[in-house]
Image (tube, helix red, strand yellow):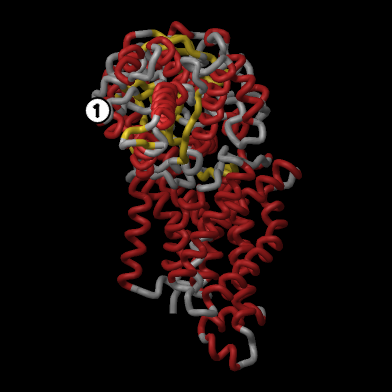
Amino acid sequence: MFSLDLLTDAVVAGILLGGFYAAVSLGITLAFGLLDIVNIAHPAFVILGAYGAYVGNSRLGLDPIVAGLLGMPVFFLLGMVVYRVYYASFEKRGDESLRGLVFFFGIIFIIEVSLLLQYGVDYRSVDAAYLGATLELGPITLPFRLAIPFAVALGLTLLLHLFLSRTFWGRAVKAVSQDHLALRLMGASPVRVKALAFAIAIATASVAGALLIMIGPIEPSVGREYIGRVFAIAVLGGMGSIGGTLAASLILGVLESLTSTFYGPSWALAVSFGILLVVLAVRPAGLFGR
Amino acid sequence: MVRNGRPGIRTRLVVMALIATLALWGATAPAALAAGPIKIGFGMALTGALAGNGKAALIAMQMWAEDVNKKGGLLGRKVELVYYDDQTKPATVPGIYTKLLDVDKVDFVVSGYGTNVIAPAMPIIMERKLAFVTLFGMAVNEKFNYPYYFQIMPTGPEPLTDWSKGFFEIAMKQSPKPKTVAIAAADSEFAQNAAAGARQNAKKYGLRIVYDKAYPPPTADFTPIVRAIQATNPDLVYVASYPPDSAGMIRAAHEVGLKPRMFGGGMVGPQYASLQTALGPLLNGIVNYHFFVPEPSLKFPGIDAFLKTYQERAKGAGVDALGYYLPPYAYAYLQILGQAVEATKGLDQKKIGEYIRANTFDTVVGKVKFAPNGEWAQSRVLMVQFQGIESNDLSQFSGPGHRAVLYPEQWKAGSIVYPYEKAKR
């Protein structure tokens, strides 16, 4: 059943899927890769973002992506609050490793139960005129349902990259990940910098959630499905590298797509995680890690 | 007062009064207990992956208890439901049923929703020889062979193959006759059972299986799967999937331009109002299983009143707004238990089990009679084709006219539009 058209379509589908994975994983790269905060609740924040897009779309008639962008300031503030609680309760006392993990488990639980109480357990979707449309480029078919999330994810990745490499605060975030003490000696507050970076990480979840609900229907517990995958991408990309996250997402997306198309979808995850193991064995710091 | 070592008359009177009081209390105590409620216990998926259905089922079960209590209860006693959230996790089930039986002292237990939580309850049920009516288990009793197991999903005495039988029977009556089939199923017990049945049916009808793959539940994009299916150019595409996957598969089929002659089969999701309104016209042409649709051939006594009340309660509860899939059956399985209790005039599990096994029951889902293995004596897995859906508006799905019942013949209402390419327009 091999054909060049099928191969091309599989690679394109994988790239589009990878873009979506990148959007979901950027927050983990920032929090886990740069700040050493094992925020396993990030996918739950993404689901919260998806419900935000649902509310914006179904009640206010907003485009889901616009709703996701408008939700970013709220998520930013939420991230600030979560980090301050995390810092005061765990990080300051040196309890962040295990108790911090339990804290984020608790946040997953709180988010899921709150969504259950508010919206119930029924599946929720968004509506936009372009969601069912496709773009034909010769033999390649581009579904807008995946192409638009890919474009938005690329934009988000680029913005984060520029922020981290070109702005004072971005460089401060990188500095705090490299040498906590040196930053303090320079007169900057690592806590403020980390709070800002964590808040940005959570803000990305608002847009990532909007992309998730564009791809398929959601219910409150669906975020759990993504925990393993997003951490794998952050590790494969090199723990803290925005470009690495994008590259790792695209690699996993294409691998999953090729495996699904030519071998069988049940092997897709196994192949992806197999590649992760191989990369870590050869290059423990990940693809773009230093 | 005691004189000369013998009790006085007053003391004897007091003792006799005490004995009489105790005797009277002893005689009346069982009567007082008997006047307490009949407790029916169960675990139900109120959180977790199947909570959407579990919560809808609970609403229907509470409606049954209220209806029964309004009419004076069972055997003159009120009915009380005792339930716990099984979190859609099989591991919670043995603990829940042990607590229900040993701590809550319920009179009956019934199952939660789905194969995965029914199977782990079976050892406890069998050990204590309880009558057990269950809600949507797929071939659970095939290995247990328990005589008092009764399953309400209308899959029929051979659940594995009955599930997809209609899909293949309809296909083989069409012209040109299909020759090949692709099977895609979620990597889970229910979907794999459905796929196993589809394989047997394909073999029975001499169809060549050109694609047969499982996919893992956290699949975000189905276009690679649909493209791989399209590359094998199958005449039929049989899919056994859960709601988010069904939506992904249907969207991908449209985006890729999948062109089989028939598409659908065992997809969970197109029965729910939320997915119907999300997918709208994309559903046109899909031939898929249903257990109830509001078509004239399926007007069972009491179903309209049931649905009216359910739909009012579902508003704001975050559950399926129309309730055509699980809720009527959740009401019906308690109707069966209730009718058996009334008929046997007692709470004897064995008598009730024997009674359910031997009799036919009138319920909101029609007449129900069980086969020796506890499944429906006759399958009523409907194969329904979505037709003429023009928008995403819910009102199209709340009444008749947009879902042609193609199978079984007895319940037929409408004709198939064949092939899928023509039907999906």
Residue named by callout 1: B144
SS assignment at label 1: helix
Label 1 marks a residue whose chain is B
As drawn, B1 above or below B370 = below
User: Residue at coordinates 55% horizontally, 65% vertically from top-left?
Assistant: A27
**Which quadrant, please, contains the N terminus of chain A?**
top left
User: Residue at coordinates 32% horizontally, 36% vertically from top-left?
Assistant: B4
Residue A159 in view, yes or no: no
**Residue B241 image point, x, y percent:** 43, 34
As drawn, B106 above or below A254 = above
**Residue A17 image point, x, y percent:** 50, 52
Task: Report whether A73 appears left or right of A158.
Answer: right
- Residue type beneath disc 1: Phe
**Residue B295 image point, x, y percent:** 57, 12
- Neighbourhood count class around disc 1 (C-alpha, 10 Å): few under 14, some 14–19, many 20 upward: some
User: Residue at coordinates 32% horizontally, 45% vertically from top-left?
Assistant: A263
Given the current orientation, which residue lies at the most extreme right position? A60
As drawn, B128 above or below A97 = above
Q: Nearer the viewer, residue A93 or B410?
A: A93
Q: Nearer the viewer, residue B201 or A98?
A: A98
**Residue B217 image point, x, y percent:** 42, 44
**Which quadrant, please, contains the C terminus of chain A?**
bottom left
Task: Report whether B72 appears left or right of B137.
Answer: right
Residue A29 in view, yes or no: yes
Q: Nearer the viewer, residue B142 or A29?
A: B142
Q: Nearer the viewer, residue B141 or B172?
A: B141
Given the current orientation, which residue lies at the most extreme top position? B410
Task: Report whether B393 appears left or right of B29.
Answer: right
